[in-house]
Image: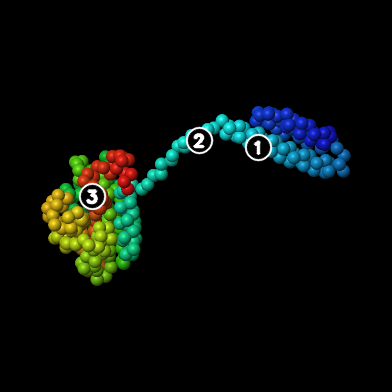
Amino acid sequence: MDINAIQAQLEDDLSAASSAQDIEAIRVKYLGRKGVLADLTGAIGSLPPEERGVFGREVNALKLRITESVSSRLNALNIKASISDKKETDIGLPGIAQELGSSHPIVQVIEEICGIFARMGFSVLEGPEIETEFNNFTGLNIPLDHPSRDAFDTFYLKDYPKLLLRSHTSPMQVRVMKNRKPPLAIVVPGRVYRPDAVDASHLFMFHQIEGLLVDENIKFSDLKGVLEFFAKSVFGSDIKMRFRPHFFPFTEPSAEVDISCIMCKGKGCSVCGRKGWLEILGAGMVHPNVFKHAGYEKGKFTGFAFGMGVERIAMLKYGINDIRLFFENDLRFLKQF
């Protein structure tokens, strides 16, 4: 077979092709299993041994030229078709704007809060939303028969009665202390669940950020300094802060932390109930029983813990009066952030 004649015939065939279907037919004609190249390859065995090598190299070179020519002709046809389509497009018509999304306000507040504590040396951890009864209650000094258990009631899994949806992010205290030795400083953001009736200030699912710091000789004054830095970073350096005695089963002593109303500057308004103060979180020194459940040596370490509702911080920060707005997916609301 004359390889030069095959090459010339290929060029004539490609010149006459006017569509992708034509190109595909040419490719099969020359490169298919029963095509021209297959015949040439099959003929190599009938040649004298001294001619086989030269002829084989020429066949391989021809195959490469056919592949490149077919591909080049197909690209040319596609470009021509693309140009033809563009001629039919009215480029004067207005385009379709692509809206850019943004982080949800709750996500923004979580990132801001975690960033503040990260600058103070805290590590940001996440824990499972399905927890054991021990980690959620017993390990945090909330025994089965304790009255405070009602305040942390939650949803149990039907087929696994000892597993539940965590009612706070505090179970990570137990998990971390069981696996790490002090010094340790962590904050834990995440979703939590409680069977609360839905209203302007309550949901059955919301977000919390738990904080824990444990080392030797940690004092309540250390807790006050950390929380003051946090509060002023979020709400402004001109706010005042106070601690009110309170009860939490996993801390002793415990306190509710208030800031002066950011709306009325402490003078009293409808936002703060005319009191001049806004509650932002709960805190206290880690209870010795929590250290005991974690396996820490008695009396060797002290520490503090705190917990806050992210939605509450966001509502105070942005002046929002209904927690349900965060989860109704109303773009008119969400686009403000």
Please determine whether, in this image, residue 209 is positioned above or below residue 77: below
Residue linked to disc 1: 75
Occupied quadrant, residue 10: top right
Assign a secondary structure to mark 2: loop
Viewer-proximal residue among 11 and 210 = 11
Q: Earlier in the sequence, mark 1 or mark 2?
A: 1
- The answer to whether any part of residue 65 appears in the image is yes
Marks 2 and 3 in Cβ contact (< 8 Å) = no
Q: Residue at x 24, y 71 (%)?
A: 217
Q: Position of residue 309 (x, y in %)?
A: 24, 52
The numbered mark at residue 319 is 3
Q: Nearer the viewer, mark 1 or mark 2?
A: 2
- Total count of labels: 3
Q: Of the residues shown, which amino acid type is indicated by label 1? A: Asn
- Quadrant where the N terminus is found in the figure: top right
Farthest-out residue, left:
274
Q: Is residue 45 left or right of residue 247?
A: right
Work out how far the residue at label 1 is from the one at label 2, CA to CA, in angstroms: 28 Å
Residue linked to disc 2: 92
